[in-house]
Image: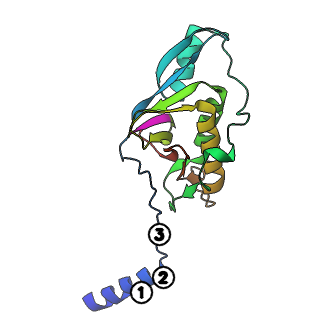
Amino acid sequence: MKFSTTIYLGFISLLTPTLAIPTPSISMPLGSEGSMHVKGPVVPGGPNMDFDGTVEEVIEKMGEMNPEWERQQGPGKALESRYWRGAPKCVNIGGKGALAHRIDEGVRHLEGLGSRICSAPASDCSRVSCSYGSAIFLCSNRDRPADVPCERIGAAAKRIREDCTDPAFTFFGNYVDGHWIDTDGYAVYVRDGNC
C-alpha cells in the first residue's frame, strides 16, 4: 500500500503544473497593513489637510468635513509610460488573491481623489484600499517615503487588475494578484488583505 501511494502521488505531482511565482525587486513585507497618508484639500482651493487610513476611510472623513465634497473626475494622464517599468508582474494564484470586482471599487475611490498625494513610509508598505479581503498596497523601496498622486496608484491597480485577473470564475468572482514597479523606487501591489 505504501509503495502504491508513493507512486500515485509521484504521478500526480508530474501532472500538476508548477506554479512559478516571480520574485519582485521590491518585496512587499507580508503582514504590511500600515495606514496610508493622504494630503490634499477638502474644499477646492482650500488648504491641504492630512488624513490617515485606507482610501475608503479618507473619503468618509472628507465627506464628514465637507458634505458637498465630490470626488474628482478620472485619472487624466496618470498612467504615462515614463512612470512604470515594463508591464505588471502577475502571480499565478490558483484561487487566492484579491477579488477583482472589489479592486475595481478601490480603483474608483483612488481615481476620485485625483492629484491628492497618497504616501507610504520609507522602506515599507501602506494598505491604500481594502474591502472584503481585497487590497491595494503602495510600497516604498527607498530611504524616504513614497509620495504619489492617488490617481496614479488607482491607474496602476487598474492595469494590474486588467493584466493579472485569473480567468477562472469562482463562486465569489475572479481573483487577481500582481504588482507593478515604478521607475522611482515604489510599487503598487494588488493582493489579498486583512480587512
Residue 156, position as x, y percentages in the image: 61, 44
Q: To which quarter of the image does residue 139 belong?
A: top left
Residue 145, position as x, y percentages in the image: 43, 33
Spatial separation of the CA atoms under disc 3 and disc 2: 12 Å
Q: To which quarter of the image does residue 194 belong?
A: top left
Q: Mark 3 vs mark 1: which is more N-terminal?
A: 1
Residue 108, position as x, y percentages in the image: 65, 33
> Which quadrant does the N terminus fall into?
bottom left
The amino acid type, in three-letter code, at marker 1 is: Phe
* Contact check, label 3 and label 2, Cβ < 8 Å: no
Does the stretch in magenta take in 131? no
Q: Nearer the viewer, residue 35 or 173?
A: 35
User: Looking at the image, which residue is at 47% across and 69% down?
Assistant: 19
The amino acid type, in three-letter code, at marker 2 is: Leu
Q: Which residue is mark 1?
A: 11
Residue 90, position as x, y percentages in the image: 55, 58
Spatial separation of the CA atoms under disc 3 and disc 1: 17 Å
> Which stretch did the figure color magenta?
124-128
The disc placed on residue 19 is 3
Find numbered disc 1 in the image and state the secondary structure of the residue it sits on.
Answer: helix
Find numbered disc 3 in the image and state the secondary structure of the residue it sits on.
Answer: loop
* Contact check, label 1 and label 2, Cβ < 8 Å: yes
